[in-house]
Image (tube, rainbow, N blue to C red):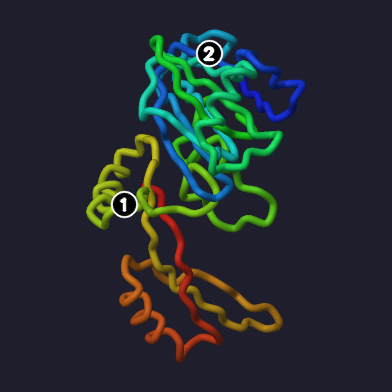
Amino acid sequence: MTIKAWFDTDQQLPPGEELFRSRREFTLWAYTVSHGQALFRSSGSSDGAGGLPRNTTVEVLFKPAEVMRIRDRYHGLLIRVAPADVAERVKATYPTITFGPGDRVFLLESRGETDYIISMAVGWHEDVLAPTRRSFFNDVFAGDTRWPTTPLPGADAGFGVASATDLIEALRGGEDHQRVRRERYRHVYVVMTRVQLGDEPEISGSGVFLTPEDAEEAKATLAAHVADCWIETLPIAI
């Protein structure tokens, strides 16, 4: 069973309305300047309520986040729309920003302290997060040809890129066939070839390399024997 919600209209977001409450621990998990997306995650166990298993992940997304006064970790979290007078006071502290009618002040309350995010919308999603799924808010859509490497779509600062040593350790750890969360990635270089067999071309991967230099060397070796040869840069989940 999946539990999720998305709030972005005046009818859903009246002043003072409580939107979300959880006793779980949340951390700021990802942020991207693309559409100002801020993602908070709780990777702890569910209490089993609502028919959910106990190993669920909960994610809360604010989009687009114009202003944030937050901390990196919340021990229990309540999110509500700020009352009109509170929202007015918060916005008044940012005189250089022109807020639109859809910019709302969301209060984040935890252990008697209150932070806030000024955003147009907020949503949350609880379910079992598959080991290679980066988040509930970065899905593969029609026309996509690459596995999403980041929790949020958009610009990526590269903090999730793993080292070559991490890649080797992940390969060794995969020998026991135990599934684990894949939170990082590293690019590998795949030499692709095309040969002409009758009327139909046959395209296949000919080798995977850890450096572009090695891939270029392999490509040069194969190029004289095939109709076409090129290098694809692909992410590997670690």
Tell which tag, 1 or 2, sits nearer the viewer.
2
Whole-percent x and y of residue 22? 49, 13
Lateral position of residue 219 relative to residue 52, left or right: left
How far separated are the C-alphas under marks 1 and 2?
Answer: 34 Å
What number is the disc on residue 232? Answer: none
Amino acid carrying label 1: it is Ala
Residue at image mark 1? 162
Kind of element beneath mark 2: strand
Q: Residue at x 56, y 42 (%)?
A: 97
Q: Residue farthest to the right? A: 11
Screen quadrant of the N terminus? top right
What amino acid is labelled 2 in the image? Arg
Please tell me which residue lies in front, 38 or 100: 100
Q: Looking at the image, how many numbered discs can be counted on the residues?
A: 2
For image coordinates 50% across by 24% down, the residue present is 58
Lower position in the chain sequence, tag 1 or tag 2: 2
Return the residue nearer the eye: 167 or 45. Answer: 45
- Above or below residue 34? Residue 176 is above
Residue 137 x %, y %: 57, 38
Q: Is residue 234 above or below residue 219?
A: above
1 and 2 marks in contact (CB < 8 Å): no
Rendered view: 204 above or below 122: below
Instruction: Please give the label number shown on residue 21.
Output: 2
Return the x and y of residue 238 as percentages of the image width and height.
Answer: 36, 47
Q: Residue at x 66, y 48 (%)?
A: 141
Image-based side of 117 in relation to 188, left or right? right
